Amino acid sequence: MPSSQPDDAEQRRVEQEARERERLLALARQEAANNEAARVEAEQKEMQRQEQLRLAQHEAARQELAREEAVKKEAARVEAEREELARQESQRQESARREHERAEAVRLEAEQKEMQRQEQLRQAQLEAARREAARQEFAKQEAAKQELARQEQLEAARREKARQEQARQEQAQLEAAKRDQAQRERAEQEAKREERLRAIGRQLDQEAAQRDAANRSPGVSGLRRGWLFGRADPNADLVQYALVMGRKIEFNQSFDTVRELVKQPHVRPVVTVAVRADGSVEKVTFVTSSGVPALDEAVRKVIASQAPYGPFPPALARQYDVIEIRRTWIFDSAIRLE
C-alpha cells in the first residue's frame, strides 16, 4: 500500500506537465497568429505609409524582441514553477519517506520496548520466584537454626543445671570444709583465749596481791576496785565509761604536745589509769614504757589535763570505788587509744 502513493503522485505530475506544454503551445500558436496578422497589417500600412512602415517594423521588431523576452521569461517562470513543483514533490516524497521511516522506527522502537518490557517482566517474575525460593530456603534454615538453638539451649540448660548441681555439691563440701576449718580455728582461738585469760588471771592475781599488800599498809583504807584491760567485759557500764573516757582523751586535740616527741624512735606505751568514783585520777601506771621519758611524761600530762572524767554512773558507783582502765596509746596524726 505505501508504494502506490508515489506512483500516483508521479502520474499526476506528468499529466500536469503535459497540460502545461499544451497551454504553452496554444499560447505560441496564438502568438504566431497574432504576429502574422500584425505582419499583414504592417505590410498594408507600409504600402500606405512608407515612413510609418519602417517605424512600425522597427517598433514591431522591438515589440517582438520584448515578446520573445517575455516568452522566454514566461518559459523560465514556468520551468521554475515546474522545478519548484518537482522540488516540493520531491520534498513531500522525502518527507513522506522520512515520516514512514520515523513511523517504522517508532514502531520498531515500540516493539523493542515491548520486548524489553516483556523480558523485564519475565526477569522480574524469575527474580520474584528466586527470591521466594530463597525466602523459603532461608525460612527453612532459620527454622533449623532456631530448632538447633533451642536444642542447644536445652543442652546448655541441662549442662548448667548439672554444673549448678556440681557447684552446689562443691559449695556444700567447701562449706563443710569451712565449718571444719572454722571449728578448728575457733578451737585454736579458744585455746589461745584461755591461755590469755590464764595469763591475765595470773597478772591480776599478782596485781591483786600487790594491792592487798598496799591496802594492808598503814594509812590505806580498803576500796572496791574494778579492772578493764580490754574492750569487752560483762559489765556494760564499765565498758561504756571507759569508752567515754577514751574519746575525751582522743578528741581533746592535744596531739601538738607530743608532735615533736613521737618523731623519736619509740614503742607504743601501754598505760593503766586508775579513776575514782568522782572522776578524778588516782594514779597512772605504765605497763609498757614508750622508751622516751619525755613522751611518757607528756602522756601523764595529757591524762591529767582531761581530768576529771566524770563521776561513775549510779550502777557502776554501787559496785566500785576505783576502776583501772588499760589502753595502748598510738601516735600517728592524732592520739588514739586501743
Image (cartoon, rainbow, N blue to C red):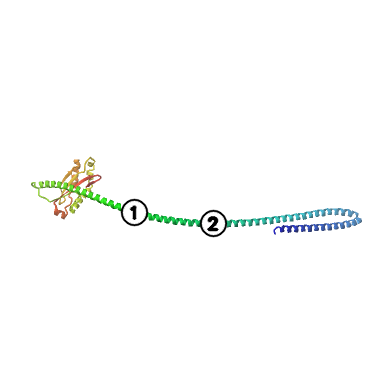
Side of 280 relative to 157 (left or right): left
Determine the residue located farthest toward the left in the rendered image: 218
Which residue is at 84% across, 54% downward? Answer: 64
Side of 109 relative to 19 (left or right): left
Which residue is at 69% across, 55% downward? Answer: 97
Dot 2 alpha-carbon crowd within 10 angstroms: few under 14, some 14 to 19, many 20 or more? few
Q: Would you say residue 129 is visible in this rendering?
A: yes
Which residue is at 48% across, 57% downward? Answer: 136
Q: Position of residue 279 (x, y in %)?
A: 16, 51
Which residue is at 52% across, 57% downward? Answer: 129
Pick the quarter of the image with the N terminus.
bottom right
> Rounded to the nearest whole Å, what is the CA distance between mark 1 and mark 2?
52 Å
Q: Which amino acid does label 1 sit on?
A: Ala
Q: Where is residue 181 in the image (x, y as percent from the top left)?
A: 25, 49
On the image, numbered disc 1 is attached to which residue?
162
Q: Position of residue 60 (x, y in %)?
A: 85, 54
Determine the residue located farthest toward the top in the rendered image: 265
Identify the element where label 2 is drawn: helix
Side of 22 relative to 216 (left or right): right
Q: In the rendered image, which quarter is residue 87 located in?
A: bottom right
Q: What residue type is labelled 2?
A: Leu
Side of 32 relative to 300 (left or right): right
Determine the residue located farthest toward the right in the rendered image: 47
On the image, numbered disc 2 is attached to which residue?
126
Q: Earlier in the sequence, mark 1 or mark 2?
A: 2
Along the line of sight, the residue nearer the viewer: 193 or 161: 161
